[in-house]
Amino acid sequence: MEAEFWHERWRRNEIAFHQGRANARLTAWFDRLGTAPGATILVPLCGKSHDMRWLLECDRRVLGVELSPVAVEAFLTEYGIAFECQSEGAFRRYRGGRAEILCGDFFDLTPRELQGVDAVYDRAAIVALPEAMRARYVRHLLATLPPSVPILLVALEFPDGEMEGPPFSVTEEEVRGHFGDACAVECLASHEILEQEPGLRRRGLSRLGEHAFLIGPRAAR
């Protein structure tokens, strides 16, 4: 997926992927990340997600990463967050209250930008990327995060060939393949959600699973 694809989607407001509420898997399983009030949660490819607002309301700090300035400024203005913006390396950093969003290419992140991150929440990143880029995404995420940071990952799964992404289908087997060598992977829950996603059903899906995973450091042996 080239950057211009996402810039064009936001410019045209073609954002059917944007959910109108906080994700149910986030609200159900967030406590398993084990973070305390004031902790910083990284949200990659964050868009203008309601999930970030929910995290802020839980007294967490949010560090989003988003390619489109349209999405970043929409999030901040729609939620009435006064913000300032300045250039920092490859990114424009938007700051407002307990929210910060780095506007730029996720693959330009370095460990410097992510120092202080306590946990990761990914609902919209891995499923937004085609297969070849997903492996690169996971490698870069793990390489730039501080050690032992837990990840709550939400993935979608649907039958092969029924729909062209994004979003893309990401199976449990694939998640374990990407993370399993370096991390412990626990599938927390799986739910059939096609009835809640009429837009995806109109795109041809016969079923749609949503899986929540907790990904963390392997226990010492």
Image (cartoon, helix red, strand yellow):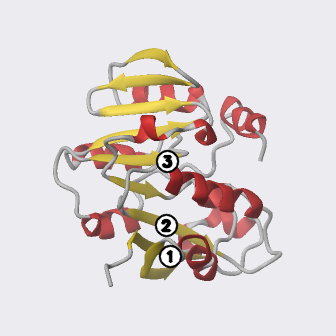
Q: Which residue is mark 3?
A: 144
Measured along the vertical axis of the image, is residue 16 above or below residue 115? Answer: below
Quarter of the image with the C terminus is bottom left
x and y, in percent, of residue 10 in the image: 66, 34
Q: Which residue is mark 2?
A: 154
Taking the spot 52% from the left edge, 53% from the top edge, the residue there is 143
Does the CB distance between marks 1 and 2 fall below 8 Å?
A: yes
Q: Amino acid at mark 2?
A: Val
Does the CB distance between marks 3 and 2 fall below 8 Å?
A: no
Taking the spot 36% from the left edge, 58% from the top edge, the residue there is 149
Whichever of labels 1 and 2 marks the residue nearer the N terminus, that label is 2
Q: Nearer the viewer, residue 28 or 14?
A: 28
Determine which quarter of the picture holds residue 185. bottom left
Q: Secondary structure at mark 1?
A: strand
x and y, in percent, of residue 44 in the image: 51, 47
Q: Amino acid at mark 3?
A: Thr
Whichever of labels 1 and 3 marks the residue nearer the N terminus, that label is 3
Can residue 101 be seen in this snapshot?
A: yes
Q: Nearer the viewer, residue 83 or 109?
A: 109
